[in-house]
Amino acid sequence: MIKLSYDIKNYRKDLAELIKPGDTVIELGCHLGGTTRLIHKDANVIAIDNSPEAIGEMSCIENVLFISGDVRLHEIIRKVYEIEQKCDVLAIDLGGGYHPDTVFKVFYIWSSTFKPTHTVIRNRGILEFFNSAFSSGEDIKSESGYLDSYHDSGIPPLIKEFELWTPSLKKE
Ligand SMILES: C[S@@+](CC[C@H](N)C(=O)[O-])C[C@H]1O[C@@H](n2cnc3c(N)ncnc32)[C@H](O)[C@@H]1O
């Protein structure tokens, strides 16, 4: 299942409903662990964030492996892949108003790599697109937390598109 929200209360509620005891959760954009602290008792969490503030706050939460890094980068995906090759739940909150194009790309790459049963995304633009689009009626959909269409794409060797889409990735 893929769940979308903008309000952080709904994001947290969706995660609480979907995570089962013993699940492996990959959380992208944990910040100071507001959501992590609600889910870590029942799950093994790998939490990733590139904010320097997250480092001290996240390093001492039980059942949580924190990785400081940019989730758009191949080296970070590979680092996580060396620890876990599959997850039950993928949670993505890079900031509710954050670029929907980047968030979708992050969703696509992480979900096609770790094949989650469920993905929960917090992003206003993606939710707005989903709520506004009308389908042609073709029955193309996935029951899982990743897109069946891209099931076997694997980890791309380099995620060069991000350089075009996300100016903040470029060093000044
Ligand atoms: C709104 S906060 C997340 C709040 C958190 N989910 C919670 O429940 O408290 C968004 C976080 O995404 C992180 N973030 C944004 N872009 C990122 C990226 N490319 N790689 C890693 N973290 C990123 C930011 O550093 C920030 O901490």
Image: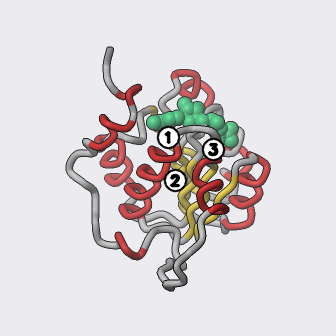
* Residue type at the position of mark 3: Glu
The residue that label 3 is drawn on is 62
Q: x, y (%) of residue 11?
A: 71, 53
Task: Check mark 2 vs ligand 1: CB closer than 8 Å? yes or no.
Answer: no
Q: Which circle, 3 or 2, is nearer the viewer?
A: 2
**Occupied quadrant, residue 168:** top left
The residue that label 1 is drawn on is 48
Visible in this render: residue 135? yes
Report crowding for label 2: few under 14, some 14 to 19, many 20 or more residues within 10 A (C-alpha): many
Ligand 1's image quarter is top right
**Occupied quadrant, residue 121:** bottom right
Badge 2 marks a residue whose secondary structure is strand
Badge 1 marks a residue whose secondary structure is strand
At x 66% / y 64%, what residue is drawn? 19
* Residue type at the position of mark 2: Ile
Q: x, y (%) of residue 29?
A: 55, 40
Q: Quadrant of the N terminus?
A: bottom right
Q: Which circle, 3 or 1, is nearer the viewer?
A: 1
Task: Check mark 1 vs ligand 1: CB closer than 8 Å? yes or no.
Answer: yes
The residue that label 2 is drawn on is 26
Q: x, y (%) of residue 36?
A: 66, 45
Q: Is residue 162 above or below residue 21?
A: above
